[in-house]
Amino acid sequence: MHPLNHWVPLIAADGAAQVELDAEGRFTVYLEAASNPLLLGVPPFIETELGDHATGRPDEPYTFRAADLTEYDERFEHYWTDLDVVDTVMAEIDKDSPRYWQLAKALQRSLNLFDEQDPDSVEQARAALSDVLAKPANASAMDISAIGHAHIDSAWLWPVRETRRKVARTVANALALMDDDPEFKYAMSSAQQYAWLEQDHPDIFARMKERIAEGRFIPVGGMWVESDGMLPTGESLIRQISYGRRYFKEHLGVEPTGIWLPDSFGYTGSWPQIARRAGYDWFLTQKISWGDTTKYPHHSFLWEGIDGTRIFTHFPPTDTYAAWMTAKELAYGERNFRDKDLSDKALMLFGFGDGGGGPTREMMEHIHRFHDLEGVSRVTIEPPDTFFREAREQMEANAGEEMPVFKGELYLELHRGTLTSQQDMKRGCRQEESLLRTVEYLGAAASIADAGYAYPTAEMDRIWTTLLLNQFHDILPGSGISWVHREAREDYRRDLKRLAEIAEEACAVLRRSNPDADLLHEAVISQYRADGPAWTPAARTSGDGVAVRMDRTERGVTLANGLLTVVVDADGTIRSIRDERRHRELVPAGPRLGAYELLKDEPSVYDAWEIERDALLMHKTIEGGRIMSADCDGDQAVVTVRTEFGASAIDTAITLERGSNAVGFHCTVDWHERERFLKVDLPVALTALDAQYDSQYGLVRRPIAKSTASEEAKFESCTNRFVRIAEPDYALAVVNGSIYGCDVHPIAGDAVQGRGQGTMVRLSLLSAPVYPDPRTDLGRHEFDWSLVADATIERTLEAAAALNAPTLTDMPAIAPLANLETVSGTAVIDWIKLADDGSGDLIVRLYEAAGGHAEAVLHVADALADATVHETDVLEHDDLADDLPVCLPGRGTYAAEGATISLNPFQLATLRIARG
């Protein structure tokens, strides 16, 4: 209960009771309260076991101390607000200006007139301020569009169950304020939070819907939750929108027009394309202002994605999503706004946030005075859509063809540790996304093969929405209390098990529908293959090529398969990997590939959120590794290595398979460190100016050699499935199973020291922060990665798809439901599923993956021989904006079999295949 919002009206001025009284005139107050670990205090980020009821205190450490009955006179509240506005405006304006001294004189007169012993004197005291508070704003003052808001983290320093209560309390506060003040408007995001309110408090939900119909309670964003913006797959981001917008339309009767992500930790360069192809017109965030190194050049601009799609984007220049509506904030926002030459409009979100609460009456009283007041920006309460429309129109009119543009990802120069913290969140998310891809495909195949198969739509919806919740920007990044992550782990265990069962049920249907089909005991369905059809079951290993051989010596083990020769030293690190076909040594002299490093990880702030640049310099190589076993059966050679340090241990299996151009690593870590960070070194004998990183529906380049402050700030960045180092005629890729953090830097050659030139790739495996979860990541973890030699984009995509695909047992051979025959370039079908509308149509999501133009021919299974195909938006509707490129000629409908597909660089497309 905040000091400015902790009173409850009991009796109105006319004597009417505002609360329910019993026969004797008594009333009961129910206090609902919960506490959470302290974030910013003295000192901040205190280690605590109170973040989980399983480890919390058995007693009740908090006491309700007092409540006072007070007579309320609104005249005094209005006078206090007048005084506060005058005082705070004076603090922000030039002290040599006439306005300052006019305010000072009026303030002096007012205070002289006020006598606390004479309540009626307040009217004269207010009158003494009326003239200076009536002076209109300067003609050049900025126009601030204010909207009430309460950023409610769906889980963070509290569990999900408490968020449900926070939502109810906050919405009730907002509705009460609407009753008191007809000008108040409020915006709220996250379909999940509306759904909780609908389930838990249908009475409040019904009142809220009345205000939605009036246009005063404004649903924004249209996503299921405010998710992480870098780690989920592109399909997950699309499902955030599709599930969110479906709920908003069906339950609230609205369709939001902008993405609302004020607090996520960076934003993929694919967001503009995803948003525009979902029908959105604008994008909002303010988190980028938190960066620790450089300042982004604009607050209002066109954000251009990696494919060239643009969306109008705004960063509120007050640098907060929880403004108190003060003169100080308004003055800062006006000074800070970087596009004043083109616009005088900015957005301001006001209301207590993170843990909810929302706007207060005091904030609204300030807005009424700031509406048109000399010395501050003009403030008007209006819907975000109004601001975005008017701001864009104004900027386009003033800029013409010189609208400011920012291209590429919005990298947050902060919170880089969230790429690694709480590894179970990362592995669970990656595994479930990969299994969902396979299950939805198998469900589509089973539906086509057997009309009697009942696709488990309701259960799949539950699994999807649970995953989307766990992709919230404090759950997936690993910055919540232990209670939050314990529940998410339980969700992943339950739903991965159920998805495996659904996959087997679909496989059983496919086996029955074609009993003569060959069965693969262990198979994967990969979304991309460089040489052969994708989306059909295949063995995880090809079995082709020269048999693997192994030689043991006192110095270690040598593995060879005719394509690669790998030399593993006695300590388990790799001294050499030679590409025999291309005659290339892939490991530079000096550094050891596969060595583990322990970094000191004691950030000055935001423990679980950060890995600081200095930590990368405070590293120590873990010595003492030893080969435990080396086995080879001709199809596969496996060398197991054990490395022990402190109370922790690492077991690594190094694998070379027949016919493979990759060296595989499976790593199990028993982790018992505190405030340390674990990385693995992968030095490669290649040099380049930048590295290519996998991203949603494309690639992003980041510098290897950092020459500017902005480049230096990207010292740790998101890998998604792979990072690729490419010279003009040769490339090497590091593909991973569920590792998101990575740093890449040059290795300077030194002939005297015997060190070869190259590039160091270091994957971030584990961290051990103590706040907000003092036991972060303690225990056993598994990791997979591989080093792909001669890694063309196509081979890298194939390796990444195969490594992340789940293994299916007793899978019958089936033809691909849809597949692409490449004519030129690199087109990938990323997802195949049944349409959401229950029509039985097939949805195919594809994109260009290499950054060039691609052309391909679509082929479909025999059962779809009479099907037609046309392009939709990502929500599967025929509403694709006219200015967006399409992959089918003329936006027409064609026979699915043999349709020609054309894609621009990194272009995303959604096809609907209607069964004939």
Image: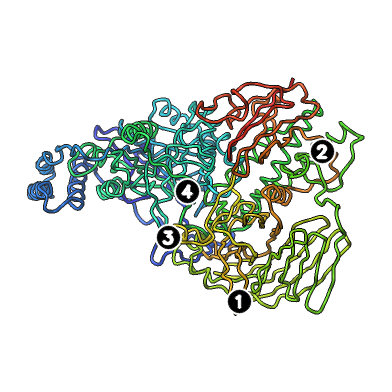
The residue wearing badge 2 is 507
Residues at discs 3 and 4 in contact (Cβ within 8 Å): no
* Front of the two marks 2 and 3: 3
For numbered disc 4, what is the local secondary structure?
A: loop
Residues at discs 2 and 1 in contact (Cβ within 8 Å): no
Identity of the amino acid at label 1?
A: Ala
The residue wearing badge 3 is 709
Identity of the amino acid at label 4?
A: Leu
* Residue 178 shows in the view: no
Instruction: Residue at 64%, 49% (x, y): give it.
Output: 429
* Front of the two marks 2 and 1: 1
Say which of 572 and 71 sits in front: 572
Identity of the amino acid at label 2?
A: Cys
Tell me which label, 3 or 1, sits earlier in the chain: 3
Position of residue 105 measured from the top left corner of the image (x, y, whole percent): 8, 49
Residues at discs 1 and 4 in contact (Cβ within 8 Å): no
Q: Residues within 10 Å of mark 2 (few under 14, many from 20)?
A: many
How many numbered tags mark residues here? 4
* Front of the two marks 1 and 4: 1
